[in-house]
Image: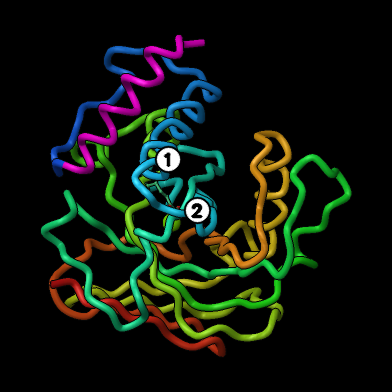
Amino acid sequence: MITEETTAALADRLDTARTTRTATPSLADTHSLHVDDAYAVQRALVARRRARGERLTGVKLGFTSEAKMAQMGVSEVIVGRLTDAMRVADDGDLALAGLIHPKVEPEIAYRLGYDVDPGDPTSFLVGAVDAVAPALEIIDSRYRDFRFTYEDVIADNTSAAAYVLGPWSPPQDLGDRKVLLTSGVQEATGSTSAILGDPVRALHALRDICHRRMIPLRAGEVILAGAATAALPLVAGTTRAEVAGLGSVTVRGV
Ligand code: OOG
Ligand code: MG
């Protein structure tokens, strides 16, 4: 385990990388972090944002798709926190100058209708979902060239930078829906089954992580289930994701 001082120093380093838009080398170059250390750095990093007035709005899962695992060379689901400062309105603008090297992913968002107690082993996350929506996640690793270890990316709040939610619909089976992402001239197609076979499994995985890491989930919070295709670079202009039968969501890079 790393000390509290080291945890604070690494959180400061990642915080500064983001606010000054200067990528930093992998923490693993100089520190040997355990997964628990990495989540402690993430907590300290998010605490800095909260101390500046940001409010928690949900959680996001990462590495839930095989395309993503292959792209990033890792193999286990990770969780990060979302805040109100990361939220961009559907059809809204996102300033690229505020980011280092952003990429975009098409995702599914779940909204919770009531609080879920992470300490209660019988809590049922799927039953707490009161709405679902197509979503875009903008990731922007604070590490140089998006090169990081599994522990690095957890410490960096799983590369979370921004998110956009499309229109909400009632909860429904979201297995095997076609997903199309267009960003500038680039296009990626996939299926919701890329998300652990079925995005509902992301909820099961999240329940386990929240239980293990004592992460409470509150009514109204959003869960991003993870990318349904490989990430594309986020460029100036319109980026859009469409999930068959669920609708679409758009952001404009400016
Ligand atoms: C980590 C974030 C991965 C997802 O949906 O798999 C993620 C990264 O690739 O930088 O958000
Ligand atoms: Mg994602």
Q: Percent from the top left, x then y, of residue 93?
A: 22, 75
Residue 65 sits above or below residue 148 on the image: below
Question: Left or right: 250 with respect to 172?
Answer: left
Residue 16 part of the magenta segment:
yes
Residue 58 sits above or below residue 1 on the image: below
Q: Of callouts 1 and 2, which one flags the residue occurring earlier in the amino acid sequence?
A: 1
Gap between marks 1 and 2 measured at Cα: 9 Å
Q: Percent from the top left, x then y, of residue 1?
A: 51, 10
Question: Left or right: 235 with respect to 105?
Answer: left
Badge 1 local density, few (<14 within 10 Å), some, or many (20+)? many
Quarter of the picture containing the C terminus is: bottom left
- Magenta region: which residues? 1-19
Instruction: Look at the numbered discs 1 and 2 and tell me whether their residues touch, using CB distance below 8 Å.
Output: yes
Residue position marked by numbered label 1 in the rendering: 46
Q: Residue at x 33, y 81 (%)?
A: 250
Element under disc 2:
strand
Residue 167 part of the magenta segment:
no
Main SS, magenta residues: helix
Residue position marked by numbered label 2 in the rendering: 56
The answer to which of 230 and 38 lies nearer the viewer is 38
Q: Quadrant of residue 141?
A: top left
Q: Quadrant of residue 232?
A: bottom left
The answer to which of 172 and 50 lies nearer the viewer is 50
Figure quarter occupied by ligand 2: bottom left
